[in-house]
Structure formats: structure tokens, C-alpha cells
Image (spheres, rainbow, N blue to C red):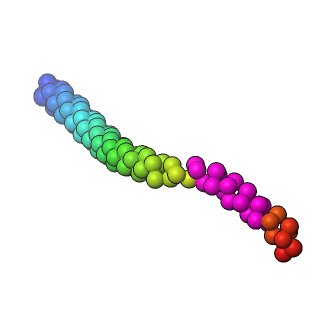
């Protein structure tokens, strides 16, 4: 009878250790799946940010092209100030 009790005890230990391994594998798999889900989400967001950055860069390049003429505004302003100053001197000489 003692050998039956010993066998029962060994069987219980083996089943208990298998349950532990099963629980460990399930937890490990859950952690791996969670990490994969997070990495996939991060990579998708990075792709969207990259696409937006390309669009923003293209828009800024167009803005540079469209506003290039504003560089000449300083010259135009200086010329307008010189003309106004000349007209002011002319008015004073004519008594106005």
C-alpha cells in the first residue's frame, strides 16, 4: 500500500509541476503578445508621423517658393521711402 501512496504523491507532484509550466507559458505568451501589440502600434504611429512630416516638408518648401518675392520688399520699401522723402522736400521748396 505504501507504494500506491508514494505513486499518488509523485503523480500529484508531476501534475502540479505541469500546471506550473502551463501557467508560466500562458503568462509568457500573454506578455509577448502584449509587447508585440505595443510595438506594432508604435510602428504604425511612427509611419503616420513620417507621412505627415513629408507632407509638412513639402508644404514648407512651397511656402518658401511662394514667399521668395518678399525678399525684394525691403528694396521696394527703401525706394518708396526715398520717393516720399523727395516729394516732401519738393513740397517744402514749393511752399506747401
Residue 42 visible in the picture: no
Q: Residue furthest front?
A: 94
Residue 44 visible in the picture: yes
Decide: is 62 above or below 91: above
Q: Does the magenta-highlighted stretch encompass residue 87?
A: yes
21 or 39, nearer to the observer: 39
Residue 87 occupies which quadrant of the picture? bottom right
Q: Is residue 26 left or right of residue 88?
A: left
From the image, which quarter does the N terminus lie in?
Answer: top left
Q: Residue furthest bottom?
A: 96
40 or 45, nearer to the observer: 45
- Image location (x, y in percent) of residue 95: 87, 73
Residue 27 occupies which quadrant of the picture? top left
- Image location (x, y in percent) of residue 47: 33, 44
Decide: is 65 above or below 92: above
Q: Residue at x 12, y 28 (%)?
A: 4
21 or 79, nearer to the observer: 79
Q: Which residues are magenta?
A: 71-88
Q: Residue at x 71, y 60 (%)?
A: 83
Q: Residue at x 78, y 61 (%)?
A: 85
Q: Does the magenta-highlighted stretch encompass residue 95?
A: no
Magenta stretch secondary structure, dominant:
helix
From the image, which quarter does the C terminus lie in?
Answer: bottom right
- Image location (x, y in percent) of residue 44: 31, 45
- Image location (x, y in percent) of residue 3: 14, 24
Amino acid at each position: 500500500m505504501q507504494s500506491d501512496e508514494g505513486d499518488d504523491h509523485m503523480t500529484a507532484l508531476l501534475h502540479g509541476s505541469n500546471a506550473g509550466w502551463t501557467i508560466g507559458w500562458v503568462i509568457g505568451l500573454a506578455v509577448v503578445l502584449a509587447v508585440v501589440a505595443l510595438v506594432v502600434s508604435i510602428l504604425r504611429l511612427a509611419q503616420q508621423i513620417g507621412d505627415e512630416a513629408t507632407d509638412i516638408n513639402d508644404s514648407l518648401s512651397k511656402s518658401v517658393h511662394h514667399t521668395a518675392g518678399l525678399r525684394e520688399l525691403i528694396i521696394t520699401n527703401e525706394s518708396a521711402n526715398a520717393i516720399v522723402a523727395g516729394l516732401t522736400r519738393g513740397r517744402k521748396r514749393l511752399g506747401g
